[in-house]
Image (spheres, rainbow, N blue to C red):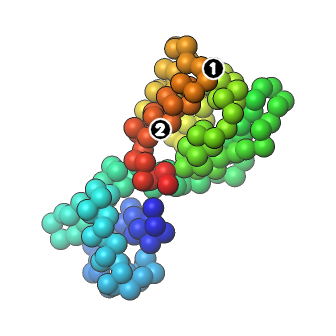
Amino acid sequence: MLDERLKVLKVISEVTRRMDLNEFARLVGLTTNETLKQIQELTKTGHLRSTSGGYGITEKGKATLKAQQRVPEGSEFNFYNGVGQSTGLSARTLKEFYETVKTVNVASLEFHVYRGDFKNWIQEVVKDEVLAGELDSLTQGELMNGNLREKLVALIEKRYDVEALR
């Protein structure tokens, strides 16, 4: 998602009072026309909704922000192939996690899924109980190789708009 749209979403999610468009544009750091264009685009894509006298962030908008949000320092997810076998890859956002899941070797996915590492990180660090529960269900099945990667990617895409993960 474009940085300008993310700025608009972030400011809308943080603002606690009504304000005019000029003041809002100053907070976002764009011109009034640029801000209005981004608001219209975000409304069209379902990230914002028009309310009486303004705009509000939708669940889709909140999910987009969550996917981009960095986890606290030291809480990133580090990918391993086995105990003591680091891949050298880590994720500091849900977006980075998603991108890494799409490319890391399958041995790493299998190692983490069956230990519950993905579920625990999503639950405790990202704070998404729904996705954590869905990831927990993966340990019940016998998904191997490409099937496991496909299922992981599909679960993340189902919970978070794919556009938010780009």
- Where residue 145 sits in the image (x, y, percent)? 61, 24
Relative side of 15 to 145, left or right: left
Residue ID at (45%, 34%): 154
In the image, farthest residue toward the left: 52
Give the SS element for disc 2.
helix
Which comes before the other along the chain, label 2 or label 1? 1
Is 25 drawn above or below residue 56 in the view shown? below
Q: Residue at x 56, y 31 (%)?
A: 149
Residue 151 appears left or right of 26 = right
In the picture, residue 102 is in which quadrant? top right
Q: 128 or 143, which is in the foreground?
A: 143
Does 72 appear above or below 123? below
- Residue 42's label in the rendered image is none
Name the amino acid type tagged 2: Ile
Residue 156, label in figure: 2
Residue 139: give x, y in percent of width and height.
Answer: 56, 17
Disc 1: which residue:
114
Residue 97 in view in this figure: no
Q: Residues within 10 Å of mark 2 (few under 14, many from 20)?
A: many
Marks 2 and 1 in Cβ contact (< 8 Å): no
